[in-house]
Amino acid sequence: MRRADYKPIPKPTFLIAHGEEVMRRRFKDTLKAAGYGRVVAVENGRLALGELQLGYNLLITALDLPGLDGWRLLRMIRSGAFCSSRLPVLVVCDAHLVSVAEPMARDCHANLLAENDLAQLPDAVVSCLDGPKKPTVLVVEDNPDTARLIELSLRDCFDVQVALTGQEGLAAWQTQQHELILLDLMLPDLNGLEILLHVVAAKATQLVVVITARSEQVIHRELMEAGATAFLSKPINSDLLSIFCERILRQYGTYRHQRTDLERRQESERFIHERILAAHHLLTTGRAGMATQQLRQAIAAQETPLGDDEWATLLAEFAPEHRNVVGGD
């Protein structure tokens, strides 16, 4: 073969790091079925760290990784000492750990995927390669120079929209529902308090940071009671503004995910309780078939099914003759 005709084989694009061979194979098969053919898989974090120096477009790693756990590996990546600090990372973990891992993933700029949701892997890969979506911030500030300073300070990490009047800011928020509002207190039309009351009345969980040069305790108390999240004092320190906004979003994000998880579990428990009450009523009125349907729905709603030993214990408690039914001899 002449040198002019030689074309080097491209290096693999994706690196998979997972301690279980079955999972590594499932990841590779799913990616190849989606048209991604260049994939390398390793079984521990130390091998992954060495491979990453060869250059990859994406790392798919387990949360619990042998040799070097996933979070330590991720922190080493973000340091920039071992590969590009901007390497996209997709962390896969058990479904029940996703809500716990989300705050840490956000801090490390990683995406998350539940292991039992591998059908979504190709879409998750596309999201990683497209890059993280910037949080949206609305700046409502009537001083053009101050508004421009804030925009320049935040635009690298946030999707920033500026409004120079209260009416313009309120209309912009109603259209886009920004994740964070930086709201000047003194505006020429609607003042900051009026906008805050409008916004919180429409969305109680909205994050609103009030920008003000006033430090009176009574003013701060009134704004906090009206729904303000925090305050920014004038003159604004532009060097620390991005860190301040990230901290507000991160702290609230942790609370929001914990609250969502709690509400989901409470709703599940309420559903199960209602099915059990309905089954009891149906049994007492002689409708055993319908009662069975209600109990099946309650069992299906259980997030963690009972194991064989637990079933055996339960059956033995209510029907001793069934003690050996579950689990064999």
Image (cartoon, rainbow, N blue to C red):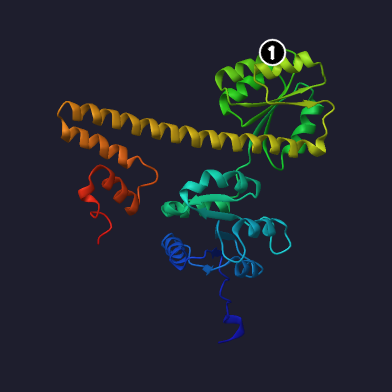
Asked if one can make out residue 147 in the rendered structure from this viewpoint, the answer is yes
Residue nearest the observer in this picture, 26 or 185: 26
Image quadrant containing the C terminus: bottom left
Could you say where residue 295 lies in the image, as x and y percent from the top left? 26, 37
Q: As displayed, is residue 175 above or below residue 269? A: above
Residue farthest toward the bottom in the current orientation of the protein: 1
Give the residue drawn at x 28%, y 44%. 317
* Element carrying mark 1: loop
Give the residue drawn at x 78%, y 31%. 148
Give the residue drawn at x 82%, y 21%. 213
Q: Which residue is mark 1?
A: 190
Residue farthest toward the right in the current orientation of the protein: 235
Could you say where residue 97 lies in the image, as x and y percent from the top left? 51, 48
Could you say where residue 121 lies in the image, as x and y percent from the top left? 46, 54
Image quadrant containing the N terminus: bottom right
Q: As displayed, is residue 313 above or below residue 268? A: below
Asked if one can make out residue 167 in the rendered structure from this viewpoint, the answer is no
Residue 116 lies left or right of residue 199; in this view the side is left
